[in-house]
Every structure is written in structure tokens, then in C-alpha cells.
Amino acid sequence: MHRNCSRARAPRAGFTLIELLVVIAIIAILVSLLLPAVQQAREAARRSQCQNNLKQLGLAMHNYHSQHKMFAGMGMGDDRDLSPFVGLLPFLDEGALWEQVSNPQPVTFYTPGDTQRTDFGTNQAGVVRTAYPPFPNSGWGEYRVWDSQLNVLLCPSDGAPKPSPRSWGDTNYAANWGDNAAGVRDGDIRKCRGMFEEEALHGLKAARDGAVNTLLFAEIGRNNGDRAFQGGGLRNVAMGAFDDNGGGTAFGFSNPSLCVDAATDPNSPGRYPAGNADWDGNRGQDWQRNEAFDTGFTTILPPNGPSCTRDGNLNDNSVISAGSYHGGGIQAVMVDGSVQFISDTIDAGDDALPNPVAGPSPYGVWGALGTRSAGDSTEGAF
């Protein structure tokens, strides 16, 4: 008789298909739960870096004030064309760059054989200039110093790419022009009510509404291609009359709310209409330039609101809004050097009212933060 000597097979170790699918599902659930936390942690780090940048700007401005008894101004330089950031260079550990700006530099050209810039001109004796003057016009594209990118002026939360070589440096921070569109960049019209105005210098004493209650610099977004309010502006918007009060001196827009109506994409709130030929996406493109669209903001429309102009450009007589990609608001440094987060739902008053020339701002707490001496209340700002 033959015995069956074969042994029973031992069960094979490993996962069944069902068990494997269950494990994959569990891992997917864990990743979905953890990913937002990781993203929030990264944004918190970026926001902290942005906050530190603003602290450095505030400290630099106070160090400037200690030395010069006033803040660095807008519209300085040979052509009234330089932003406050130029004057702050020595106080931002950019002494070498400051030396280049404050001393004549040889004229350089991109094109071989080019012998003279058509807009550079000659001196009074008729001799072609061979060097840039100190503090040159920021519009001179061949002036290589303006290509420098200051890392302290870039917020890591902004998704826009860094400028390419041989292009002017960008900024995510801008100067407070106040709550009146008139006076922005144009010294011939009514002056701004903020801490900065064309060719005028203010110090701590000018902030009579309180240094802790007055904006110095705030965030602006650069263009990342999504047509968001933070990173662009709309030209040629009829915001009501630009009232000259019969005296030839512009007092501002009579109805800024028309900017909101014209600039908002009905299918995508918070963004400019797609295909609009008047959209300009170059917000914050030149840190050295005294242009409202590049280095300024107004407190007419709330943070993360649209930016508009009535005359075809975004530098003069414009409603230029602050903005950021943090979500929910912006960060700003006040005149006293403190950094605050300001919600984009802050009380912004009535944007259908005309720009003011005196007295409290009609644009609520947000407008009040922009004025230096209007007697405004900023209760509940932060």
C-alpha cells in the first residue's frame, strides 16, 4: 500500500488585492488630511518672512529718520522719479548699491555701435554726456543699477516669477499715498493725504493721527498671470468726474465705486475681465520708480480690491489698491514700525463718495489708516 507522503502547502504570506486596495485608500485619506496642514505650515513660514521684510523696511525708515530727521521721500532724484526705496538702500545693507546710485556711472549701451542715447541729451556746453548723473531717472533702461533685485522687497507668498536678468527689479511693498487719487505722481495737483507725496518730505511729527494708526508701507501683489486684482489694474475707467472745483486743481474722483463695477469679472469675482484690452498686469514691476502703480497704493478701495485709472495709464490720478496672496487680507508696517495684518473685510466706508480734500476719510477705517493728519478714528482696525 502506498502512502501519500505529500504535505499540505503552507498558506502564502502577503496582501490580497482587497487588502492592498484598503491600504492604498487609507494612505490616500491620510495624505488628504495632512496635505492642507503642510500647505498651511508653508504659508505660515512665507507669511512670517513677509512680515520680517516689512519689519526691516520699517526699521530702515526709522534709521533714515534718525539720521535725516525725516522719512525718505517720493519723487526725489534728478527727475522727481525715484521711490523711497532708493533712499533706504544704505539702511537695508545695500551700501554698495547706494554708492553706485549716488555717484556718476559710465553710460553703457546694449547695441554695439550705439554712440548716444536719444533721451540722454547733452550738457549746456553742447557736449554729449558720457556718464549718468547721481540719482538718475528710473526710466533709463540701460542704467544697469536698476536691474538689481532686492530680496527684502519680495514676498515669498507671491507666486509671480522673479524678474529676468536685465529687467528692472520688482517689489511687493508700496508706499501709502492716502485716500485721494489726486496728487498721485503729479505735483501740479492736489497733494496726497498719506505719508508720501510728490517731492514732499514728512517725518514722525506729520503723523498727527498717531504713528500707530498711520500706514507707512503695505503689500501689493505682482502679476502671476491669473488676472487677480492683486496683480494688475484697469485703464480708462470712467469713475465719474475728476473734479477740478472750477479752479484748475484736481480734487479726485467723484465715484470710485465705478472702478469696482468696471473691473470685476462677473464670472470670476476678484479678477479682471478676461480679454479686456485695458488690463495692465505690471503691478510692482520697478522698485526704484516713483509711479503709483509700481510703488504706491491708495486707501480708497479696500485691500485686495481692483485698481483703475481714468486717463489711460496707471501712474497718475489713479485708484491703486493694496493686495497680497496670503488670503484674507494684507500685512502692513505702520509709521511706528509695528507690523499689522489688515483684513480685506475692514470697514472701507462708502466707495461711492468723492475723494476728500479735508477732514475725516469717507472710506471708513481703511481710509483713516491712510491719512496722516485728518483727525480720523481707526478703532477696530486690527
Image (cartoon, rainbow, N blue to C red):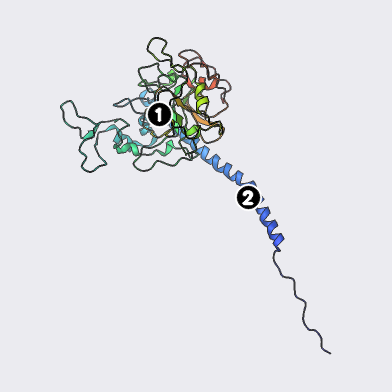
Q: What secondary structure is marked by label 1?
A: helix
* Label disc, if present, on residue 31 of the rendered structure: 2
Left of 108 or right of it: where is 209?
right
Snapshot quadrant of residue 169:
top left
Image position of 316 with respect to 115: above or below: above
The percent position of residue 119, horizontal first and vertical second, equals 25, 31
Circle 1 residues within 10 Å: few <14, some 14–19, many ≥20: some
Viewer-proximal residue, 121 or 150? Answer: 121
**Quadrant location of the N terminus?**
bottom right
Snapshot quadrant of residue 114:
top left
Three-letter amino acid code of the residue under disc 2: Val
Left of 29 or right of it: where is 57?
left
> Residue sitting at 74 percent across and 71 percent down?
11
For residue 268, say whether it is visible.
yes
The percent position of residue 45, horizontal first and vertical second, equals 53, 41
> Residue sitting at 49 percent across and 32 percent down?
230
For residue 58, say whether it is visible.
no
Q: How far apart in space, not on screen, are marks 1 and 2 (Cα)?
A: 47 Å
Circle 2 residues within 10 Å: few <14, some 14–19, many ≥20: few
Q: What secondary structure is marked by label 2?
A: helix
> Residue sitting at 15 percent across and 27 percent down?
125
Viewer-proximal residue, 129 or 60? Answer: 129
The percent position of residue 34, horizontal first and vertical second, equals 62, 47
Judged from this view, the residue extending furthest toward the bottom is 1
**Quadrant location of the C terminus?**
top right
The percent position of residue 326, horizontal first and vertical second, equals 54, 36
First in sequence: mark 1 vs mark 2? 2
* Label disc, if present, on residue 334 of the rendered structure: none
In front: label 1 or label 2: 2
Q: Marks 2 and 1: in contact by CB < 8 Å?
A: no
Q: Which residue is mark 1?
A: 63
